[in-house]
Image (cartoon, rainbow, N blue to C red):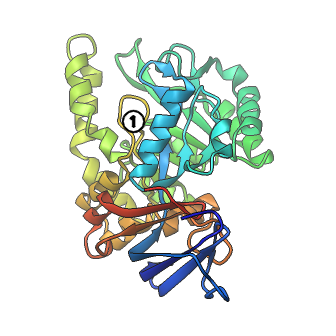
């Protein structure tokens, strides 16, 4: 479709879980539900249309070894786009990817700045590695650099104990989260284990990544405070391999990782049943491939989350949570069209028929 043309999307336009329209129009890259007068040069696409998928935990500009060049970051973003992900919450990256904002053909990114980790307690070359007395200053710095989010590493392997352990004292976490909120940013944290969760939630955190350490003691606290989780189940699937690699040196940690893996589906379902907001994220860009949002939706349904709720976790609900529009009048036309109804079978998300970014059909 040319920039001057009009795009018509016809069939079933899934504006919301209960709001289904017969068609929408795209004029000047924007959505309209009113047929434009005298429209010519019309391109018609038919099928089931959804807002572009959301990956709420993704890393563009990062691989297993640290920051990557612009060409690699572009390929990562294109892979996400070509699999239907058109909105990314980048949950920590050492690369400057602001140039992506100038590209009309790439997903939109909400950045959380660079990871903030305890010294020698995270993956090398990923994070600002600091001590607790520096936490407030670094949170303030990343809140100013990001797009309304800051990312902490809440726990990691503690070599002195041979197991996962909390990274930050409670007082410093409280002060840091308060500083982020003062600056208008929300805070999320990487957490695999159990022991960091209560302090982070009671300190006012907004979201927890992975959240495999949730228990019957902390789930009610999350629900009461409205703290969201992004389980990244496609990443948690790697825990047995990670554990096998650490058996000889850190057997306690390896056993812990296996137990977290074994109960992963029960943990996510219990969180959902308690009313905790659950969103789709893949953790792509570290050791994991990009373009896996559809697979993560399937994983959520395996955990027992109803298909429509799992679909919302990467579409309507996720966009509301991140403060970005979906298929609304005047919004940028970022949408995906499928040949089958994804409400009937979420596996349809793995086979987009057409991908539209800023009103242009790109795939």
- Residue 276 position in % (x across, y down): 46, 61
Horizontally, is 87 left or right of 284 in the view?
A: right
Q: Residue at x 21, y 17 (%)?
A: 247
Establish if 44 lies above or below 177.
below
The quadrant of the picture occupied by the C terminus is bottom left
Say which of 304 and 102 sits in front: 102
Above/below status of 126 relative to 152: above
Q: From this viewpoint, which residue is outermost toward the right?
A: 182
Rendering quarter of residue 332: bottom right
Relative depth, front residue between 257 and 19: 19
Q: Compare residues 357 and 272 and report the one nearer the observer.
A: 357
Tell me if I can see residue 19 in this picture. no
Find the residue positioned furthest to the front: 41
Binning the other alpha carbons within 10 Å of mark 1 as few (below 14), some (14 to 19) or many (20 upward) gives many
Please state the total of marks drawn on the protein image.
1
**Residue for point 62% across, 41% down:** 100
Looking at the picture, how far across and down is residue 288, in whole percent? Answer: 35, 34
The residue at the point 67 percent across, 89 percent down is 37
Relative to 256, is 110 on the left or the right? right
Quadrant in which the N terminus appears: bottom right
Secondary-structure class at tag 1:
loop
Percent of width and height locating residue 91:
54, 39
Q: Is residue 103 left or right of residue 280?
A: right
Nearer to the camera, 230 or 15: 15
Q: Residue at x 23, y 18 (%)?
A: 245
Q: Is residue 197 visible?
A: yes
Task: Measuring from the top left, give residue 17's x and y in whole percent.
Answer: 44, 79
The part of the image, by quadrant, that contains residue 40 is: bottom right
Quickly name the residue at label 1.
193
């Amino acid at each position: 479709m040319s920039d001057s043309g009009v795009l018509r999307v016809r069939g079933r336009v899934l504006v919301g879980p209960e709001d289904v329209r017969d068609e929408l129009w795209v004029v000047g890259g924007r959505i309209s539900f009113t047929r434009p007068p005298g429209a010519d040069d019309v391109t018609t696409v038919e099928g089931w249309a959804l807002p572009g998928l959301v990956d709420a935990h993704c890393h563009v500009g990062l691989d297993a070894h640290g920051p990557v060049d612009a060409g690699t970051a572009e390929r990562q973003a294109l892979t996400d786009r070509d699999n239907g992900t058109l909105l990314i919450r980048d949950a920590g990256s050492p690369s400057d990817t602001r140039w992506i904002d100038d590209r009309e053909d790439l997903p939109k990114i909400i950045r959380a700045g660079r990871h903030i980790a305890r010294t020698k307690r995270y993956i090398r070359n990923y994070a600002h590695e600091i001590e607790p007395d520096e936490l407030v200053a670094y949170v303030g710095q990343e809140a100013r650099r990001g797009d309304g989010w800051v990312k902490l590493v809440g726990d990691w392997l503690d070599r002195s104990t041979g197991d996962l352990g909390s990274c930050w004292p409670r007082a410093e976490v409280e002060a840091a989260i308060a500083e982020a909120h003062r600056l208008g940013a929300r805070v999320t944290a990487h957490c695999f284990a159990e022991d960091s969760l209560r302090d982070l939630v009671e300190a006012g955190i907004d979201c927890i990544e992975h959240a495999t350490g949730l228990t019957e003691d902390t789930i009610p606290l999350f629900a009461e405070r409205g703290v969201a989780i992004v389980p990244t189940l496609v990443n948690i699937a790697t825990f047995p391999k990670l554990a096998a690699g650490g058996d000889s040196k850190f057997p306690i940690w390896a056993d812990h990782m296996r137990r977290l893996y074994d109960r992963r589906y029960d943990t996510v379902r219990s969180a959902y049943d308690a009313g905790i907001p659950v969103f789709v994220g893949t953790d792509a860009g570290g050791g994991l491939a990009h373009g896996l949002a559809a697979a993560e939706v399937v994983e959520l349904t395996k955990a027992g989350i109803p298909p429509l709720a799992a679909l919302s976790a990467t579409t309507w609900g996720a966009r509301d949570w991140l403060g970005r529009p979906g298929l609304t009048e005047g919004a940028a036309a970022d949408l995906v069209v499928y040949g089958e109804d994804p409400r009937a079978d979420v596996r349809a998300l793995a086979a987009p028929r057409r991908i539209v970014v800023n009103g242009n059909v790109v795939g």
